[in-house]
Image (cartoon, grey):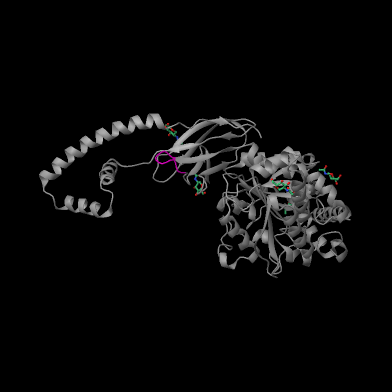
Amino acid sequence: MVMKMNLLFFLVLLASAISSSLAKGSLKQTLVASEVNKCSNASLARHLLEDESRAQTSVNLAQGYMSNTDLERAIKEFGQRCSNISRIYSIGKSVNGVPLWVIEISDKPGEEESEPAFKYIGNVHGDEPVGRELLIFLANWLCDNHFKDPLAKLIVENVHLHLLPSMNPDGFSLRKRGNANNIDLNRDFPDQFFFINDDEDSRQPETRAIMNWLRDIRFTASATLHGGALVANYPWDGSEDKRTKYYGCPDDDAFRFMASIYSHSHYNMSLSKEFLGGITNGAAWYPLYGGMQDWNYIHAGCFELTLEVSDDKWPGAAELPILWRYNKMSMLNLVASLVKTGVHGRIYSSGDGRPLPGSITVRGINYTVRAGKTFGDYHRLLAPRDKYEVVATMPGYKSKNTTIWLDEGPVTLDFVLDPEISVKWSVLQNVYACNCNGKSKQEFVQFLGGAHLEVYFALIVILGFLFLLLQRRAKVKCSTSRHLPVAKRTVEV
Ligand SMILES: *[C@@H]1O[C@H](CO)[C@@H](O)[C@H](O)[C@H]1NC(C)=O
Ligand SMILES: *[C@@H]1O[C@H](CO)[C@@H](O)[C@H](O)[C@H]1NC(C)=O
Ligand SMILES: *[C@@H]1O[C@H](CO)[C@@H](O)[C@H](O)[C@H]1NC(C)=O
Ligand SMILES: *[C@@H]1O[C@H](CO)[C@@H](O)[C@H](O)[C@H]1NC(C)=O
Ligand SMILES: *[C@@H]1O[C@H](CO)[C@@H](O)[C@H](O)[C@H]1NC(C)=O
Ligand SMILES: [Zn+2]
């Protein structure tokens, strides 16, 4: 059906191109018609098709797909069947009050660990329901196989995987793209170039639920599942000047790497004739604004892909098991890439050894990844390359950097940062350390305030002496207790 319409549409375009060029009186220009299939026009074709397919959706289409009630039941049943490795929670409600249920899968669901978190979101567009089914397949497969399959085991033990099968349950039941207010949720996020979506209170409830979710959980990466094409799409989705052109984000290499993991693990995504390698930069395909993908990268430290998993937006339900088979390895490998690639580690204070919620940057890439508050852990996705200079910073501490070599496997890299203390402060602090209550501190300060010049002089001499002594001691201490960060290679689990 869709193929037919594609053809039909192509013919219409062809005809209109020919007639318009005939009108201009130049036969040569009919050649332009052969350009119709190129990117920009292809996306135009796709947009128009979206409207067509919306019109022709019928009740029959839903046959074999889970209704919202079925989906809720499936999620809850999963939670009971696989309670060992899962937790069910809701991140909010749709316009019509349907809970946005999430399945978290991990050997310690709901607990904070020094592990990366990944999320999959399905059914962002109401009329693209394949994702919501695929995520239920994925959850059940992980539950059934985490004892026997090494990849399932790796994911369950080392990642916190969150699955939101439907972000747009209202759109699904209405068989349309937007939510119940007819808003396209993938155009409803604050945008980096246009500010119409900046007022957070005016966002749709589904959008706000996602934004709050990302403030709650520090996701390292994620992917949304769409339909209507077969390609892995990566940021930026919008270009500054609204033109259709390649517009890469600072982490273009890492994104191309991630998108390629998906397309090359897929049954035939990488064989695409339209998209080289089955991947595309968003703006190079067609620019869009207010998208979820760019917002994730800019505001949540989360590397998000937009996956178009089937040419047909709403294929017959009989095709769902096949689509699961085609996407299964891609979905698993993308999640596992959080453990199997990139730089991971923790940031500590050299003083008391406590974890620091510092930041990680990489020289030459204008992007910051934050470490966690509880464990000081960070997870920095990077494409394999022979050399990266990784810098750890934390306010009040001296930053440190190390060069690493990143081939196929991951690198574990811990940082131990030294407090940055000015000389005067360090001496005073040591003096304070001797009288350990607040009252004597105050007295000391008052004493300083009221003293005469001679006293100041004597004090400076004494403090100077003390400082030298302490510094020497500190040096000895540092050289013995401080272990320099060493690039150690983790074993592949
Ligand atoms: C479609 O292609 C034609 C010819 O290449 C071009 O003039 C036109 O701008 C394209 N349409 C869009 C929407 O880019
Ligand atoms: C749950 O965990 C326990 C202990 O690890 C194990 O014995 C049991 O088989 C697990 N059950 C399921 C359903 O995975
Ligand atoms: C991938 O396989 C499906 C099912 O066989 C087919 O419909 C689709 O055209 C193929 N796509 C590519 C890019 O080979
Ligand atoms: C780095 O990115 C920020 C936005 O995140 C931007 O404001 C800044 O200008 C960029 N710096 C450089 C040197 O490109
Ligand atoms: C890395 O450390 C060296 C000294 O160890 C310093 O010269 C250099 O500026 C640092 N680079 C960055 C990006 O901080
Ligand atoms: Zn979509």
Is residue 38 something that shows in the picture?
no
Residue 253 placement, left or right of 225: left
Highlighted range, magenta: 349-354
Residue shown at 73% from the left, 37% from the top: 150
Q: Indicate yes or no whether the magenta region holds residue 352.
A: yes
Give me the residue at 72% from left, 64% from top.
Answer: 178
The quarter of the picture where residue 91 lies is bottom right
Does the rendering let one see residue 159?
A: yes
Viewer-proximal residue, 15 or 449? Answer: 449
Inspect the magenta stretch and tell me whether residue 152 lies in it: no
Q: Is residue 421 above or below residue 90?
A: above
Q: Position of residue 110 (x, y in %)?
A: 62, 53
Number of residue marks: 0
Q: Closer to the camera, 53 or 356?
A: 356
Which quarter shows the C terminus? top right
Left or right of 414: which side holds 247?
A: right
Where residue 45 appears, as percent x and y from the top left, is 78, 54
- The quarter of the picture where residue 330 lies is top right
Q: Main secondary structure of the magenta part?
A: loop
Which corner quadrant holds the N terminus? Answer: bottom right
Q: Position of residue 370 (x, y in %)?
A: 52, 46
**Is residue 447 or residue 35 the one in the foreground?**
447
- Where in the figure is residue 298, as x and y percent of width and height? 56, 51
